[in-house]
Image (spheres, helix red, strand yellow):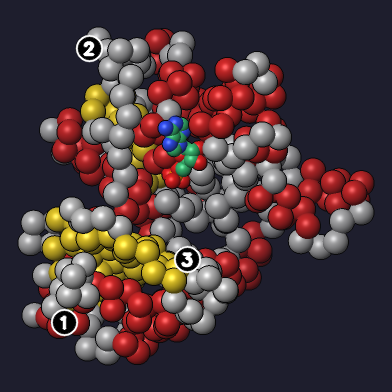
Amino acid sequence: MNVLVINCGSSSLKYQILDMENETLLCKGLVERIGMDGSVITHEKIGMDKVKKEVPMKDHKDAIKQVLDAVQNAEYGVVSSMADIGAVGHRVVHAGEKFAESVLIDEKVIAALEECVELAPLHNTPNLYGIAACQELMPDTPMVAVFDTAFHQTMPPESYIYAIPYEYYEKYGIRRYGFHGTSHKYVAQRAASMLNVNINDLKLITCHLGNGASVSAIKHGRCIDTSMGFTPLEGLVMGTRSGDIDPAIVTYIRQKENLPQGAVNEILNKKSGVLGISGVSSDFRDLEEAVAEGNARAALALRVFAKKVRFYIGAYIAEMNGVDAIVFTAGVGENDMNMRELICTDLGNLGIKLDLIKNKIRGKETVISTEDSKVKLLLIPTNEELMIARDTYNIAQKSAK
Ligand code: AMP
């Protein structure tokens, strides 16, 4: 069965088609500037050059139409008709407390997701547009929703309850939800497979370090804590997000700078993190270049980032009473050997020893700890699309029976 994976943002859309008989990627692509001037689709059939086409796309339905045209194109398409797409998997960011697993989309699921829009308006709204467009254009194809929050639903209340009046949890659902769940779950499963140990016998810490970044504690296959919270703003320092700060800073900045409502939220999400500290960039490659040129604030930004990752690793080791393996994934985790070194330096007393030679690698599934390191350090490229396709395939097959 071929599965189409759709990841809809507010003005962009990423897609892939995977053949799930052997889990091979057939094509992938990106639609940008949906609803703006200069809408463009970039499509790549695996093994062929990319094709870029500028076409007006006023909404997500136009974008999905272009995707369906591209994947059926005689020259660079990968399916001969829509009937060759067995199911569609949609990435959905927020499922609140409603779903702890991926689900087949029906009217009830849509209604439940509409109730979650309030929790993540910027993400869930375009996710729902994408689902509606696909349902209209492919009415007979089963659709599955795969949620960023689902994997974290196993957290115990002491991990997800904030120490604010309990009524806000009851009235507004204010609690820690956690994000990047599909990635944390994927790398945890890969880690178990690499170590050849049943995931139910492992204590893992997974570090998803990309532009957005989060850490999870996964005990015996279940997430018991994660660093992102009610929104993806909490936890680690990120490219442009502050991560944990003293909440009193919010009102203080607003007062001092005489800012309108919402402005501080924008500052903490878009102008903070390593960008905010360095004043240089949110991209770690630029920061490392700046450090090489002697930029002290860029160096400070990297140290603050690393310190926070170490802080969570230490906390989660305490929470799980030990750890068997620590996984690094996503853009920074997979590629930035200097950052991995900064994070893992001087952790010998915790049984964590990075092999500096093995660490000189990028984007490849491999062990990077020394032979005598009690805790295994693993580099695992994430693959959220494959995880979405797997869930979609399994659920679509069950529903067909
Ligand atoms: P992601 O959000 O997972 O796509 O990660 C994107 C981020 O990964 C970029 O903003 C960079 O900071 C970082 N990144 C990607 N490639 C490299 C690299 N070769 N070295 C250092 N950082 C990288």
Q: Quadrant of residue 26?
A: bottom left
Q: 388 and 53: which one is in front?
A: 53
| x then y, percent, for residue 350 | 40, 15
Image quadrant in which the C terminus is located: bottom left
Kindly identify which residue carries mark 1.
Answer: 81
Which amino acid type is shown beneath numbered disc 2? Glu
* Left or right of residue 162: residue 324: left
Q: 167 and 389: which one is in front?
A: 389
Instruction: Give the numbered dot on residue 371.
Output: 2
Which amino acid type is shown beneath numbered disc 1? Ser
Kindly identify which residue carries mark 3.
Answer: 32
Compute the Cα span from label 2 to label 3.
Answer: 46 Å
How packed mark 2 is, by other alpha carbons closer than 10 Å (few <14, some 14-19, many 20 or more), is few
* Left or right of residue 254: residue 283: left
230 in relation to 291, above or below: below
How packed mark 3 is, by other alpha carbons closer than 10 Å (few <14, some 14-19, many 20 or more), is many
Upstream in the sequence, badge 2 or badge 3?
3
Report if the beta carbon of the residue with label 2 is closer than 8 angstroms to ligand 1. Answer: no
Residue at 32 percent of width and 87 percent of height: 137
Kindly report which numbered mark, 2 or 1, lies closer to the viewer in this rendering. Answer: 1
Residue 144 visible at all:
no
Residue at 41 percent of width and 58 percent of height: 148
